[in-house]
Image (cartoon, helix red, strand yellow):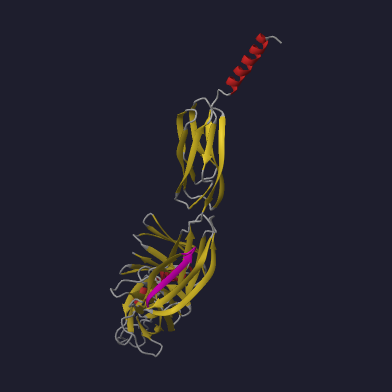
Amino acid sequence: MDKRAVVLITMLFLLSLSIVSAQPSLLLEVAQKSFKAKPGETILVPVVLSNVGNETAENVTLYVSGPAVEGFLYGSEFIKKVEPGEKIEKTLPIYIENPKAGVYELKVVARVGKMLTEVPISLRVLTKVSYSIDIDVEDRYLFGEDVTITLKVSSSSNGVIFGDVSYEIYRENVSIAEKSVHNIFLYPEYPKNKWEYVIFLPKPGVGKYTILVRTNFGGLSKTITKSFEVYQRNLRYETKFEKGIIYVRVLDEEGNGVGGIPVIIEGTELKTDSYGMAFIEAKEPGTYHITLNLDGKIVETFVEVKKLFITYEQRNETLLVHVRDSAGKGIASVTIEAIGPLGKTYSVTDENGTALINLNETGFGSISLKAESDRYLGAEAIIAVKEPQKPETQTPTQTTSTPINQTTPIPPAKPKDYGNLPIILVLSAVLFGSTSYLALFRPLKFEEQLDRYYFVKVRAPRMRELQNFRYEKAINAVEARATKGRVTIEDGKVIWEIDKLEPGEEAFLQVIL
């Protein structure tokens, strides 16, 4: 081989060496390979970047790469130029928001063009103990009510925490209950991150109560207190019987009606309305037993319901109606309604319990009597009265002298003149039949207003049932209720509908204005 060939080969070899070595070569060093931190902290990763090549490295990016996990924010650095042989020190931050506790594998990366230089590091996220406690209880309870207390612990930690809960309950600074619950585990995921404990106090006495709760989870202790009061109102009540209804009203200290008070009237369970009223219809006389629960104070009382009894006697064209109680005592100021073939009339009993009815106003025959009083159950009767016979007028006899042997002719008897009596008898029969029909076959309805209450009573005929009864009244009503049927308030009207009433059965409607 001649010298020129050797020189050419040597030049080509040196040229190839210069081409291969003419590129940057980056060296990445991380002095600390493992880190640990709690949520909310930031760690700093120190990095040394060296260019060990013979060419300048341009547009170099330093950053941290990790798994796609929420709760991490990674820092990065951009380096425009790294000369050959140059060393650059940088610090890359990692912010830990609130990832779950555990060990995470990360990388520190240096990138220039398509070239990557990586160094693995590990990050241990520690458990941060974070939780809240609460006591769920009302501020006030009426005496006689049960009290339910709920203790609550809610974890916002990023890992599993466990601990203990204890509570104490005091009444007027005197301990009445205490307990501890141990080894309670709370997890970061819902719903296992919550713990609840229910305490039940059956009808505690009047007084002020305090609940003290102590907790310790993951070495973090907390204490909370809450108070509530059991109180009793100074309630009073009124009872009365009026117009066939037994009323109970409960009032507060200021005289306002109290709603929601349990009332039992002769076995019927009721509750007072917003005006403090409860009522039932008294259908039979007797002593009615009433029980009230006045904020836990049980009160018993009685209401006496008496009934009217009527008797009668006819004296010519006057009917004497006697009204007495069950003991036979005459009752004054009782309204008597009498309906006969000719019409209706009213009277009121005197101090002896006697009322006078003019039969010329009612007519004779079948008479319907009705006695009503606010203080008694009414009485009714259908009686028959006869028209008294009018005395006949006699004509005095006159004596005349008659000649002997002379005969006086006797004129023929004239028919008796009854005048308009036949027409009256026919009309009386028609009126009697129609009145009997009213009493036996048509329903009766009564309406009356008392203060803020409007009352309606309907009674089915005695001889047949009442079907599809409907009552409408244009009235500004706040509330309405009935002993039977359906009641609605719409467009300024009260509508009362009853499907069926048995013969003689009564139903009662009360409207609060």
* Foreground pick, 419 / 295: 295
* Residue extent of the magenta highlight: 207-219
SS majority, magenta: strand
Q: Is residue 212 magenta?
A: yes
Tell me the quarter of the picture where residue 365 sits.
bottom left
- Residue at image location 47% in from the left, 31% down from the top: 86
Q: Quadrant of the N terminus?
A: top right
Q: Is 140 situated left or right of 187 in this image?
A: left
- Residue at image location 66% in from the left, 14% down from the top: 9
Tell me the quarter of the picture where residue 234 sits.
bottom left
The extreme left residue here reads: 254
Tell me where residue 220 appears, x and y as whole percent: 45, 63
Q: Quadrant of the C terminus?
A: bottom left
Tell me where residue 445 appears, x and y as whole percent: 41, 67
Tell me where residue 251 appears, x and y as whole percent: 33, 74
Q: Is residue 110 magenta?
A: no
| 467 over 110 or under it: above or below | below
- Residue at image location 44% in from the left, 79% down from the top: 176
Q: Is residue 418 visible?
A: no
- Residue at image location 36% in from the left, 56% down from the top: 492
* Foreground pick, 62 / 443: 62
Q: Is residue 4 visible?
A: yes
